[in-house]
Structure formats: C-alpha cells, structure tokens
Image (spheres, rainbow, N blue to C red):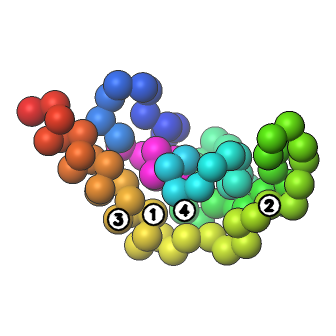
Amino acid sequence: MNMTPFGQRPAHIEDALIRLHDGQWFTWSDVNNKIYSNLQLTEKVGIDGNIVDNPVTTLPTEEEVNAKLLELQTAWDSENT
C-alpha cells in the first residue's frame, strides 16, 4: 500500500508522514512494504537547493503517526460529507 492518490481520503501512514515535516525526511527499509516498522530517517535532505544533514533526528512514534492520520481523515470527512 502506498500514499493515497490526491483528492482521496487519507488512508496510509505515508499520508501523515509527509505532513509532519517538510522535505523527504523519511524513507523505508522496504519500499514494497511501507509499514511503521520499516520507517527510517534519511541521512540527507534537500533544502533550498542544497543537500544537508536531515534536521529531523528522531522518528515520530507509531501513535503520533496514527494520530496525525486520524486528524487528516477527520478533516477530510468533515469537508467531503
């Protein structure tokens, strides 16, 4: 399962992750199995056209990611029902 297509109800943790921080701050140890246990920080990120050390130094907890996903789903539901 991957990120939800634009305009559809958020349904995957990747939808939440991309909204927690700017840039590509995370990656997956297995891109074919995008689950929390495969979540990793990237070492470098692109900021303003430069490659720098990732300013995000700790992963959010699984509970934080799930809470963000629920927040996005609740917002989507209130706007689309």
**In front here: 55 or 14?**
55
Q: CA distance from mark 1 to mark 3?
A: 5 Å
Q: Residue at x 70, y 66 (%)?
A: 56
Task: State the SS at label 1.
Answer: helix
Q: CA distance from mark 2 to mark 4?
A: 19 Å
Q: Quadrant of residue 36?
A: bottom right
- The kind of residue tagged 4 is Tyr
* Mark earlier in primary sequence (2, 1): 2
- Residue where numbered disc 3 is placed: 67
Magenta residues?
11-17
Q: Quadrant of residue 25?
A: bottom right
Q: CA distance from mark 2 to mark 1?
A: 19 Å
Task: State the SS at label 2.
Answer: loop
- Residues under numbered marks 2 and 4 in contact, where contact means CB atoms less than 8 Å apart: no
- Residues under numbered marks 4 and 1 in contact, where contact means CB atoms less than 8 Å apart: yes
- Residue where numbered disc 1 is placed: 65
The crowd level at tag 4 (other Cα within 10 Å; few <14, some 14-19, many 20+) is: some
Residue 32 in the image, given as x and y percentages of width and height: 64, 42
Furthest toward the front, the residue is 48
Q: Residue at x 29, y 35 (%)?
A: 9
Q: Nearer the viewer, mark 2 or mark 3?
A: 2
Task: State the SS at label 3.
Answer: helix
- Residue where numbered disc 2 is placed: 54
- Residue where numbered disc 4 is placed: 36
Q: CA distance from mark 2 to mark 3?
A: 23 Å
Q: Main secondary structure of the magenta part?
A: helix
Residue 29 in the image, given as x and y percentages of width and height: 73, 55
* Mark earlier in primary sequence (3, 4): 4
